[in-house]
Each structure stands twice: as structure tokens, then as C-alpha cells.
Amino acid sequence: MSSLTADIIGLIGSALMVIAYAYSNMAQSLNFLLFNGLNLAGSLMLGASLTVHYNLASMALEIVWAAIALFGLGKAISQRGKA
């Protein structure tokens, strides 16, 4: 992946995570599938960009962020099935 492509992917991932954060602060009621999906997609995109512009601390953060988002998605999906 080229440096420019990595930058674009990373910027889009960052934007998705900022959108999720803004959504969580503005929504009347939170759609946890949307919130965690945006966070997961964003963290995966940032992680992909970090394979070109490596930074250990940032990569560790994105791995943890993705794990939390996966947990949240699993919880949201299991609760949706009970409703």
C-alpha cells in the first residue's frame, strides 16, 4: 500500500470514529450496532494505515478499540435477538 493510500484510509477511519463519538453525544437513543460498527470500521482502517506508518502505541490502541467494538457488537446483536 502506498503512503498516500495509507493516509487516506487512516483519515477515513479517523473520521468514522469521530462520527461515532459525535453520534453518541447527540443521539436521543443510541443504536449500538451503528455506534460499534463505526468504531470497528474506523479502528480497522486506522490499523491498516499503521502497517505503513507504524507506531506501536497507536497500533495497540486500535487493537484494543477494535476488541471493545467487537464485544459491543456481539452484545448488541445478542440483545437484539431477545427483543
Image: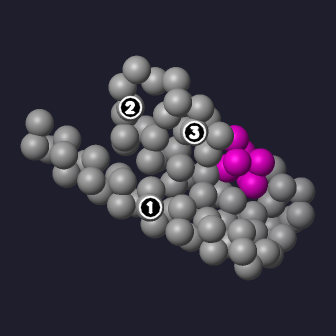
In the rendered image, residue 15 lying in the magenta stretch gets the answer yes
The quarter of the rendered structure image containing the C terminus is top left
Q: Residue at left 46%, top 47%? A: 37
Residue 4, by quadrant, is: bottom right
Which of these two is toward me, 33 or 9? 33
Horizontal and vertical percent for residue 6?
Answer: 80, 60
- CA separation in Å, label 1 and label 3: 14 Å
Is residue 51 visible in the rendered image? The answer is no
- CA separation in Å, label 2 and label 1: 16 Å
- CA separation in Å, label 2 and label 3: 11 Å
Horizontal and vertical percent for residue 68?
Answer: 44, 61
56 shown above or below 21:
below
Residue 80, by quadrant, is: top left
Whether pointer 1 and pointer 3 mark residues with C-beta atoms closer than 8 Å, the reply is no
Where is mark 1, residue-wise?
A: 68
Q: Residues within 10 Å of mark 2 (few under 14, many from 20)?
A: few
Where is mark 2, residue-wise?
A: 30
The quarter of the rendered structure image containing the N terminus is bottom right
Q: Of the residues shown, which amino acid type is indicated by label 2?
A: Leu
Helix, strand or loop status at disc 3 = helix
Q: Which mark is residue 21?
A: 3
* Left or right position of 24 against 11: left
* Left or right position of 42 against 70: right
Whether pointer 2 and pointer 3 mark residues with C-beta atoms closer than 8 Å, the reply is no
Stretch in magenta: 9-16
Prevalent SS, magenta region: helix
Which of these two is toward me, 36 or 25? 25
18 shown above or below 50:
above
Q: Of the residues shown, which amino acid type is indicated by label 3?
A: Tyr
Horizontal and vertical percent for residue 44?
Answer: 59, 61
Q: Residue at left 60%, top 58%? A: 43
